[in-house]
Image (spheres, rainbow, N blue to C red):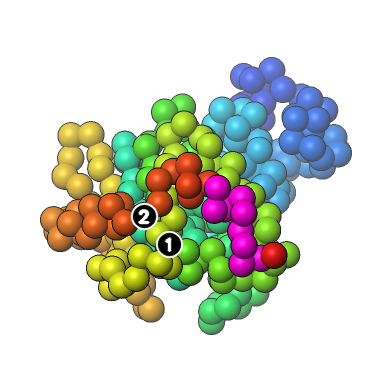
């Protein structure tokens, strides 16, 4: 049996029936989750982790271990320990803010095989739960280029933008849109994330065509970040733009 899930359910006073009701599935489906090899859908895993107040990786560690690229795992660990994250994205939305459908579309556009795409999507949803659903989530500040909001089919982007609005209303999530009218800016050199950890030095993550890399040389990135924040829209105006979404009308 999945002893971690069984114990978590017992400690939370949840049965298969009560958990199924909270997650929105059939009780028989929830009952099968304690069977070895039965791993729920990514969104159901996230819902179960919230209901039981456990990390997805604690309940289904094989999902996170197997599905993340080896080179990405050190950064995933930093995310889980960070007290604040500051993220800038240019052409796609940050992985921590992606819906399952959006993540699937983005990952499917690359060289990954179908089974690899499903695994990477599952890992991405698990990462989101590990960051946002822990007892004391980090302060997360996102600056997203407006170009990223305009890329994608309407049937994928409409719910994705709704999700961004919902996330932007969380108390420890700040979302700022960098409007196209801002013109050229230093962030065009590429996306990055700066993580701050209590008692440790800041560390940054940068992505490229081959693989991501971590660096502790963040002074220049802080200068870029300050510039980007200064030209990005305030939080309320960013939310208004997401609601209006004139490019989808």
**Disc marking residue 179:** 1
Q: SS for tag 1?
A: loop
Q: Check if residue 236 falls in the magenta segment.
A: no
- Residue at image position (38%, 36%) is 138
- Residue 104 visible? The answer is no
Q: Which residues are magenta?
A: 240-248
Q: Check if residue 247 falls in the magenta segment.
A: yes
Front one among 151 and 126: 151
- Residue at image position (81%, 40%) is 25
Residue tagged by mark 2? 232
Q: Is residue 230 above or below residue 210?
A: above
- Residue 248 position, x and y percent, is 66, 65
Front one among 174 and 16: 174
- Residue 242 position, x and y percent, is 57, 53
Direction bottom: furthest residue: 111
Q: Main secondary structure of the magenta part?
A: helix
> Quick one: label 2, few (<14), some, or many (20+) residues within 10 Å?
many
Residue 196 figure quarter:
top left
- Residue at image position (56%, 28%) is 53
Quadrant in which the C terminus appears: bottom right
Quadrant in which the N terminus appears: top right
**Disc marking residue 244:** none
- Residue 239 position, x and y percent, is 53, 46
Q: SS for tag 2?
A: loop
Q: Are marks 1 and 2 in contact (CB under 8 Å)?
A: yes
122 left or right of 208?
right
- Residue 199 visible? The answer is yes
- Residue at image position (54%, 32%) is 54
């Amino acid at each position: 049996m999945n002893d971690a899930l069984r114990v978590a359910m017992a400690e939370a006073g949840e049965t298969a029936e009560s958990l199924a009701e909270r997650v929105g599935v059939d009780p028989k489906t929830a009952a099968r989750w304690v069977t070895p090899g039965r791993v729920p859908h990514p969104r159901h895993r996230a819902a179960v982790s919230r209901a039981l107040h456990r990390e997805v990786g604690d309940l289904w560690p094989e999902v996170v271990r197997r599905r993340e690229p080896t080179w990405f795992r050190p950064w995933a660990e930093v995310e889980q320990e960070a007290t604040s994250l500051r993220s800038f994205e240019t052409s796609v939305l940050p992985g921590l803010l992606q819906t399952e459908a959006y993540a699937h579309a983005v990952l499917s556009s690359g060289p990954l095989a179908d089974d690899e795409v499903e695994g990477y999507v599952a890992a991405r949803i698990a990462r989101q739960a590990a960051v946002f659903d822990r007892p004391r989530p980090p302060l997360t500040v996102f600056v997203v280029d407006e170009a990223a909001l305009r890329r994608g089919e309407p049937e994928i982007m409409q719910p994705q933008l709704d999700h961004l609005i919902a996330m932007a209303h969380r108390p420890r999530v700040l979302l700022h849109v960098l409007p196209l009218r801002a013109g050229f800016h230093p962030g065009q050199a590429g996306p990055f994330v700066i993580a701050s950890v209590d008692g440790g030095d800041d560390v940054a993550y940068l992505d490229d065509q081959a693989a991501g890399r971590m660096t502790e040389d963040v002074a220049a990135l802080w200068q870029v970040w300050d510039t980007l924040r200064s030209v990005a829209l305030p939080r309320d105006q960013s939310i208004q733009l997401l609601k209006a979404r004139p490019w989808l009308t």
